Image (tube, rainbow, N blue to C red):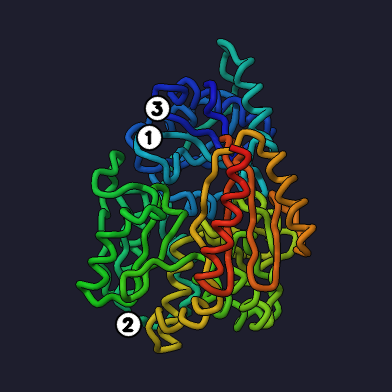
Amino acid sequence: MAGVFKTYDIRGIYGKGIDTALAYNVGRAFARWSKKDSFMIGYDARTYSEELYQALGHGLVAEGKRVRGIGMVTTPQLHYYQMEEGYGGAVMVTASHNPPEYHGFKLYDDRGGSVSYDKGLKEIEALIAGIGEEPARRGGSFEEADRLDEYIEFVTSPLEGEKIASKVVIDVGGGSAGRVFRTLSDKLALSSYILNEQPDGSFLNRDPNPLKPESRIHAAARVLEHGADVGALLDGDGDRVVFLDEHGESVANYYIAALIAEELLSKQPGAAIVYDLISSRALPQRIAELGGKPVVSRVGYTFLYDAMIAEGAAFGAETSGHVYFKVTESFYTESAAYALAVLLKLLHRRRKPLSKLLEPLRERYHQSAEINIEIGDKEGALAEIEQRYRGAGATIGKLDGVSVDFPEYWFNVRPSNTEPLIRLRLEAVSRQLAEQKTKEVVEFLKRFT
């Protein structure tokens, strides 16, 4: 069990901390911690996820709980059904975008919020350490049901019955999202090319992380081959998405978020839109131009979700490829499929290629790729950064690490939660300035390695 309880989930290599015994105990401990009566569970396409799912269900039932299993699904499906049907908690058996040997669990509370280490995983870990050979309690039950139709109705709702004549390449990467996107494509009568559609827990054809450049090569080639309007790549559990334009070029999620905001704000004037603080400044500027309320959040699902609830936001986006939508007045959910539907609607209405819609946004700033620098004294390095740049007249923010803002460039340095690393993001009004300032900050930080 050592080392598998992470900041936001439970994750590790199968057979080295992750096994059916742990899954069973996660079920028992989560039930005790949450004190709720009903739970929904699902699993991804990884090799051992189904047996972990079964053991997890047995653990929940052993605590006398009512359990609804919905089989192999995407994480967004599970979350949507949990909230729509009012289950007290949910667990997705998944290791998300990690390599195939990894397995794990994402836990959700009764509000649909992620149960992170600071919000419950620490206590659940302690409860597991105390579980011995204990008899099952009475009253538990397990029911399995196939759930897809209602979810497809939800993700196609932005189109309001419009016929969309688009060509789309969708690479689900052998994960659990194939059925969702095949059904979505059929319902919308899209001219679609779905790659790696069949679940493959070994991920032989493509790394489950769509943010890796090598993961996008095949889909980009198919976009060009078929003359597609847009491409979409999913991660292993179907929540993270990377979009490609008609040239097969990847699109940063903050630009996609700006387009989605345009569509949503046309229906919900003045609504709040939440973004993480490493997004391009083009995103909050565009939200404001559209009459929306830009709201900045710390990086990470749990922070962004909480900010959406606090603001009653219509939409939220993370730079990492996660996108979240307000479903009703009482709940929010992430959905890559819903994002695709909104984007297709915008492309249909605007009658312009995706790259042309993105051009005005891409021209505003240049953002360097994230750089990880190994540093032992992370807190000392952050304090020195703050002192140096505050003295140079920068505006300093400390929402997440240290953010440094000048009129022509900004950067953020954040400590890793699990490694001796500092992560640097920098954006400037030109590529030349971005390269110059990135070199300057990296050289400063390397004094602390």
- Give how far across and how far down residue 373 sits, in percent: 54, 44
Q: Would residue 376 be visible to someone looking at this image?
A: yes
Q: Nearer the viewer, mark 1 or mark 3?
A: 3
- Alpha carbon distance from label 1 to label 3: 13 Å
Q: Which label sits on residue 50?
A: 1
- Tell me which numbered mark, 2 or 1, is placed earlier along the sequence: 1
Tell me whether circle 2 and circle 1 mark residues in contact (CB < 8 Å): no
- Give how far across and how far down residue 218 sits, in percent: 25, 59
The residue lying at 26 percent from left, 74 percent from top is 191
Residue at mark 2: 165
- For the C terminus, give its image quadrant: top right
Looking at the image, is 82 positioned above or below residue 34?
A: below
Residue 267 horizontal side relative to residue 270, left or right: left
Looking at the image, is 253 positioned above or below residue 34?
A: below
Q: Badge 1, how many Cα within 10 Å: few under 14, some, many 20+?
A: some
Q: Secondary structure at mark 1?
A: helix
Task: Residue at the far top: name it.
Answer: 133
Q: Secondary structure at mark 2?
A: loop
The residue lying at 32 percent from left, 47 percent from top is 207
- Give how far across and how far down residue 56 sits, in percent: 49, 30
- Tell me which numbered mark, 3 or 2, is placed earlier along the sequence: 3
Of residue 103 and residue 379, the one placed in the foreground of this image is: 379
Q: Badge 3, how many Cα within 10 Å: few under 14, some, many 20+?
A: some
Q: Give the amino acid at mark 2.
A: Ala
Q: Nearer the viewer, mark 3 or mark 2?
A: 3
The image quadrant that residue 103 belongs to is top left
Q: Give the amino acid at mark 1.
A: Glu
- Alpha carbon distance from label 2 to label 1: 37 Å
Q: Nearer the viewer, mark 2 or mark 1?
A: 2
Of residue 80 and residue 408, the one placed in the foreground of this image is: 408
